[in-house]
Image (cartoon, rainbow, N blue to C red):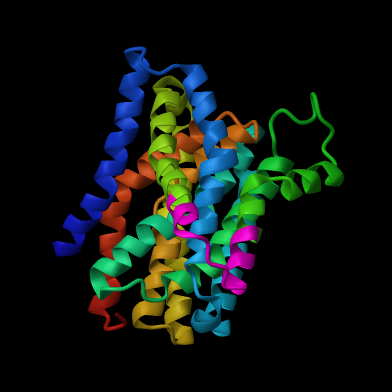
Amino acid sequence: MENLIYSLNATVPVFIVIIVGYLLKKIGWINEDFIKAANKINFRITLPVLLIQDLMQTDFHQAFDGKFIIFCVTVTSICFMGSWVGAKLLLKDKEITGEFVQASFRSSAAVLGAAFVVNIYGNTGMVPLMIIGAVPLYNIYSVIVLSAECPQKGVTQEKTIITTLKGIITNPIIIGIIIGVLLSVFQVDFPKVVDNTMANFAKISTPLALLAIGGAFDFGKAIKKVIPAAVATFLKLVGFAAIFLPLAIYIGFREEKLMALIIMLGSPTTPSCFIMAKSMKSEGTLTSSVIVLSTMLSAFTLTAIIFIVKSLGYL
C-alpha cells in the first residue's frame, strides 16, 4: 500500500498538469503558437540543459560496472529494434511508426526512477549507472527512428542515410548528451551562478512539456489511435519487463541493481518523447496518448511488479 500511495503521488501530479494544459487550451489561455514555442524551447534549450545537468552529476569513475551497463545497453537496444520491427510489420498507418517505436521503449527512467528508488532505499542506488547505459540510447535511438520514419519525408525530403545522419549529428538532445558525458568524465565544475542558471532552465523542461502535451491533446484523434496507443503502453509498462526481468534475475542482479532495471523497463513513457516527436515533424497525438495512458497506469503496474519480485525474495 505504501508503494502504491507513493506511485500515485509521483504520477497523479503529472497527469493533473497535462489536464490543466488541455483545459487551458480549451478556454483559450494557450493556443497553437504557445504549444509550438514551448516545444521549440524545450527541444533546443531546456531538455538539453536537463540532460547535461543530470549527466554532470553522475560520477562515471565510481559508478562504473561493466556487466550492469552492458545489460542495460543490450536490453535497451533489443527493445528499440523489436519495437521498430514490430511496428513495420503490424502497423497499418505507417506515418505513426516513429512515434509508436519511441513511445514503446523510452522510459521516464531518470526523473521518476530516481525519485522512486530514493523513496525505497534512501539514495539513488544504481539508477545513475542505469542512466549511463540506457538514457543516452533512448535519445539517440529516438532521433534515428523519428528521422528515418518522419511522415513528411518522401514528399518534401528524400529519405537518405545522409539526411538521417545529419539529423542525428545536429540534434540538440544528442549534443547535450555528448557535452554532459564529457563534463562528467573530466569532472568539470561550473561556478555557482552557472549551476543555478542551468538548474532554472532544467526545472522548466518537464512542466512546460506537460502543458504542451495537454494543450495538443485531441480526444478525437486519440480515439482513432486507441489500439496502437494501448499496444505501445502494454509494451512500455508490462511487455518488456515480463521478458527481461526474469533474465536479469537469472544473471544474478539483485536489490538496487534489480530495482534500477525495474524502473528502466516499467516506467511510463517520458514526456520528452512528445517534445522530440513534435520537433522532428511527427503529428504527436499517438505520443501524447501513450504518455497519458502509461502515466495513469504505471502506479499500479510498477507496484505490482515490485510486489511480485519482492515476494519472490529478489529485492
Left of 105 or right of it: where is 245?
left
Q: Main secondary structure of the magenta part?
A: helix
Return the x and y of residue 263 as percentages of the image width and height.
39, 64
Q: Is residue 194 magenta?
A: yes
Q: What's the residue at 85%, 41% (across, down)? A: 160
Tell me if residue 244 can be seen.
no
* Depth check, front residue: 287 or 180: 180
Vertical comparison of 124 with 96: above or below:
below
Vertical comparison of 286 with 302: above or below:
above
Return the x and y of residue 246 as percentages of the image width and height.
43, 76
Q: Is residue 139 magenta?
A: no
Quadrant of image for the C terminus? bottom left
Q: What's the residue at 31%, 73% (across, down)? A: 123
Tell me if residue 96 can be seen.
yes
Magenta residues, start to end: 179-196
Quadrant of image for the N terminus? bottom left
* Depth check, front residue: 232 or 148: 148
Q: In the image as oriented, which residue stretches furthest toward the top?
A: 28
Q: What's the residue at 30%, 28% (across, down)? A: 20
